[in-house]
Amino acid sequence: MAKSGKKSPEINASSMADIAFLLLIFFLVTTEIAIDEGITVTLPPYTDTPPPPVESNDRNTLTVNVNSRDQLQVEEEVTEVRELRAITKRFINNNGADPSFSDSPQEAIVSFKGDRGTSYDMYINVYNELRASYNDLRDEASTRKFGKPFGDLIDTTQINEIKDMYPIRISEAEPTDFGAAGG
Amino acid sequence: MAQPEVKNETMSKFVKKPREAPAINTSSLPDIIFILLFFFMVATRMRETDIKVKQDLPKATEMEKLEKKDLLSYIYIGAPGERLQKELGTAPRLQLNDQLADVEDIAEFIDAEKAKMPDENRSKIIIALKVDKDVNVGIITDVKIELRKSNALKLTYITTQKVEK
């Protein structure tokens, strides 16, 4: 057959699939799908002196405490996590209306305190809700002013305007140490 | 070449024209596999460390995408994996790079991570905490104090997306 015809010999490509499969399997095993998304926080610089105690009856401070049994307490009242977002939003956006809540979003501070025995899951849950309150308020303000949610804003002056309206002020106090031994 | 003839004899009642058994054309198979391969090459990244602690990350909704991967340094916290529990117990441990470590090792780890980076990025280092959700906050507080001492103040809690009901 090869002698009679002058056709150029065909390259056998059937093993190409096998080679590609090997490469594919190699990549499947040695790589992982990038799932890096996270809640970013900035820590205060380290000092030896303990921070001044937060005045819990100050109207501009919302105290959020979680104990070692993952129970949530907001302003001395036991609360469920799903109610937290609404309370925080009302607190931040009070603008002096309710005497027990903040004067203005710029002055409002959310003070979050856990216990060493609190589970990380609960901690993230609460922190996420606090962040979500701020993000919701920013979204609302941005939609009202510029017609699109905060995340879609491109212009830096607009972004900064919204950021100045609702600065994120979540302060984390050193956790208490009541329940760590048991947990 | 002989096969179709045999077939024609036995199947002549049904098949009128002599026909060759169609060969499945597999010449595009490599292309398909290559497309899959490219997808995986683009969508994934190399596994850098072998994770030795339990990692069941908590769920959240308010995360941001971490775009600057070269600034990230990972700290894993969780109970040791099942195979290691016999020796190490179930108390949560830290993992820095490839080995289990203690909270005191963080300062050294941060210095080493900063040394790997170009000068202008060193102050922008972001610590990514991958923490199992069963861990207590206590150990995380200790880690945070160490991070503040080493002046690595940007921190991110890696979480997975919560599906909202």
Image (cartoon, coloured by chain):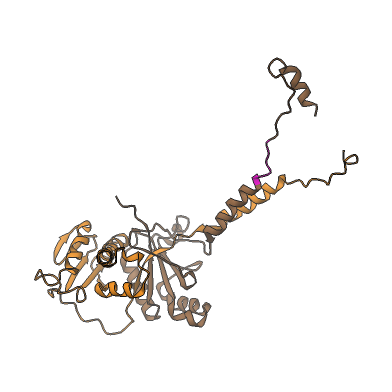
Chain colours: A orange, B brown
- Membership of A106 in magenta stretch: no
- Which one is nearer the viewer's eye here, A87 or A63? A87
Residue at (55, 55) in percent of width and height: B40
Residue B148 in the image, given as x and y percentages of width and height: 36, 79
Residue A95's place in the image compared with B164, above or below, is: below
Q: Quadrant of the N terminus of chain B?
A: top right
Asked whether, in this view, residue A152 is left or right of residue B23, the answer is left
Residue A95's place in the image compared with B57, above or below, is: below
**Residue A173, can we see it?**
no
Quarter-of-image position of residue B6: top right
- Residue interval drawn in magenta: B24-29
**Residue B32, can we see it?**
yes
Residue B8 in the image, given as x and y percentages of width and height: 75, 20
- Which one is nearer the viewer's eye here, A135 or A64? A135
Residue A46's place in the image compared with A88, above or below, is: below
Asked whether, in this view, residue A149 is left or right of residue B20, the answer is left
Quarter-of-image position of residue A168: bottom left
Task: Name the magenta segment's main secondary structure.
Answer: loop
- Which one is nearer the viewer's eye here, A77 or B62? B62
Residue at (76, 45) in percent of width and height: A12
Residue A179 in the image, given as x and y percentages of width and height: 25, 65
Furthest residue to the left? A99
